[in-house]
Amino acid sequence: MTSTNIYQDREALEARLAFRLAAGLSEQASALPNDLSERLRVAREQAVARARASRSVVAVPAAASAVVGHSRGSAVLGGAPSPWQRLASVLPLVVLVAGLLLIHQWVAHEQVLAAVEIDSVLLADDLPPAAYTDPGFAEYLKSPPP
């Protein structure tokens, strides 16, 4: 879809919405007092006049691809990007991915260290590891000491 088609679809949608709003407001206008309906009529005429005036003014688009200068260090808009510009645009993505990979490795390492610590405490304890899975032992640990 081109930008012209999108613009035309948007204009058509806005026109339909405006028509529906105007119809709904016109239906409710008969219940309003006379002085209020007169003020609304004047405001509506002013709004229509402003809309017509703004549509009659044609904006001239600025040229997007202008060359300011040809000397070293000058601002050039448009044209093919240099290899340094391409590198500068890709470099943040590379740094982000590398950072995410390092964070993932660090978290995995910390999880392994935590598991090693738990295993070493279990193996160094006087109780065998099977005692911790015994339901009777769990009840024994929950009971108050004598």
Image (spheres, rainbow, N blue to C red):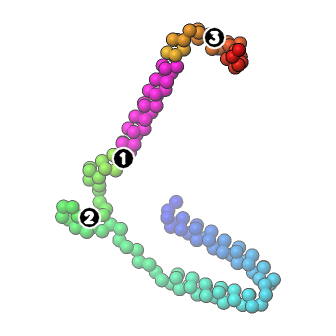
**Left of 11 or right of it: where is 90?**
left
Tag of residue 118:
none
Q: In terms of secondary structure, what is the magenta stretch mainly?
A: helix
Answer few, some or many: residues within 10 Å of disc 3's Cα (few below 14, many 20 plus, some between 14 and 19). Answer: few
**Left of 108 or right of it: where is 141?**
right
| Disc 2/disc 3 C-alpha distance (Å) | 75 Å
Return the residue nearer the eye: 25 or 135: 135
Tag of residue 131:
3
When asked about the image quadrant of residue 137, the answer is: top right
Tag of residue 75:
2
Query: Mark 2 falls on what kind of element?
Result: loop
Mark 3 residue type: Ala
Q: Residue 48: image x %, image y %? A: 61, 85
Q: Which residue is mark 1?
A: 92
Outermost residue toward the front in this view: 146
Mark 1 residue type: Pro
Return the residue nearer the eye: 134 or 53: 134
**Residue located at (22% from left, 67% from top):** 69
User: Is residue 145 something one can see in this rendering?
Assistant: yes
**Residue located at (46% from left, 23% from top):** 113
* Mark sitting earlier along the chain (3/1): 1
Q: Residue 9: image x %, image y %? A: 58, 67
| Disc 2/disc 1 C-alpha distance (Å) | 23 Å
Q: Residue 62: image x %, image y %? A: 37, 73
Residue span colored magenta: 93-119
Return the residue nearer the eye: 137 or 146: 146
Query: Mark 1 falls on what kind of element?
Result: helix
* Mark sitting earlier along the chain (2/1): 2
Q: Residue 47 in magenta? A: no
